[in-house]
Amino acid sequence: MKITTVVTAFGLSVTCGAASAQTIEMIVPFSAGGGTDTVARVFEPGFSEALGKTVVIRNVDGASGTIGAAATADASGDGSTVGYIPIGPLAIQPSLRQTSYSADDFDYICQTTSTPVFLLEKKDSDMDSVEDWIAKGKDGRIVYGSSGPGTIPHIAMAAFASEAGLNAVHLPFKGTGPAMNAMAGGEIDLFVDTATVLENNDVKALAVFAPERLEAYPDIPTMKELGHDLEFSVWQGLVAPKGIPEEALAAYSEACRKAIDTDRFKELAKSTNTGIAYRGPEEFAAFVKKDAERNREILKQAGLVK
């Protein structure tokens, strides 16, 4: 009897030890060194430590993040694979292109960041307010740029133009850099992007698409203050293939919460003007579904989807 008990306990110990030593693959759907990858690599050490497991990042880029998102959705649901994925592949691209996955093909672990975007113009512009641009957009025409069709800069500006009744023309570019050059040359009037773009280019912000004024920019009004109930941000989060065990989902969510509370992650967020925002599994899943539906409707109005 004693021998059986010892063997059983030893077997259980070995099983638990193997489980705790399991390596988790974290898929990042963009290339190494990019914005999403940079945040993921600062997030990963805290997540690994809180979980007590080894986490290895694998970059699977291409097709605006949809290849990496598909690889995450198609992976085993045993908890050995997760994806650190931003808004585009989860809540925009499935409306713009035929993807092998939808937002329903993931279990949502946690949201980690949410960075509001600003309405930007040239720093030397003689237009002083959002109201000035609305007046121009009703009496004449304005041209706004984006870093590509279906990006948050495009969606936020399209929503504003529609809500305010502006005669606005969208001019897409292959990235933010070319768009900033076009703004400097007077080719576009307005642009929408994060504080990083605001700080690193010769532009000024007229408003922020946030629920309240930002601590770092107390003098910049929100769009809501100006009569336009519009909120847009670039967010990121951790997901897993559908069907992850409930105990793993709970453990991963708690480890995620601890990871974004580390000094290292907070320092990165501060230095890059990235907003930290935690949502647990149920709240994050509901948020993604709602955001995807809203973005699809905006894209419909913009004539990009049927």
Image (cartoon, rainbow, N blue to C red):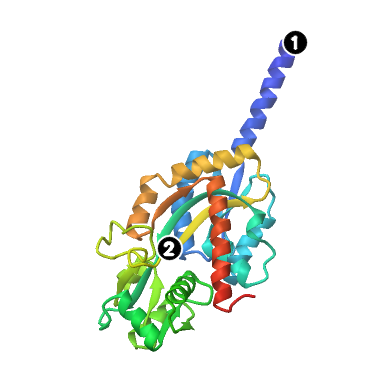
Q: Residue at x 54, y 67 (%)?
A: 295
Task: Looking at the picture, tell me which residue is in the foreground, 134 or 2.
Answer: 134
Q: In this view, does 133 lie above or below 13?
A: below
Q: Is mark 1 on a helix, strand or loop?
A: loop
What residue would you read off at disc 1? 1
User: In the displayed structure, does residue 226 sit left or right of residue 4?
Assistant: left
Q: Is mark 2 on a helix, strand or loop?
A: loop
Which comes sooner in the sequence, label 2 or label 1? 1
Residue 116 seen by the camera: yes
* Callout 2 amino acid: Glu
Using the numbered discs, state the Cα–Cα distance from disc 2 to disc 1 in whole angstroms.
66 Å
The percent coordinates of residue 69 (x first, y second) are: 61, 61
User: In the displayed structure, does residue 200 sit left or right of residue 106?
Assistant: left
The percent coordinates of residue 220 (x first, y second) are: 28, 65
Q: Which mark is residue 305?
A: none
The percent coordinates of residue 155 (x first, y second) are: 49, 72
Q: Which residue is drawn at 35% across and 84% down?
A: 136
What residue would you read off at disc 2? 231
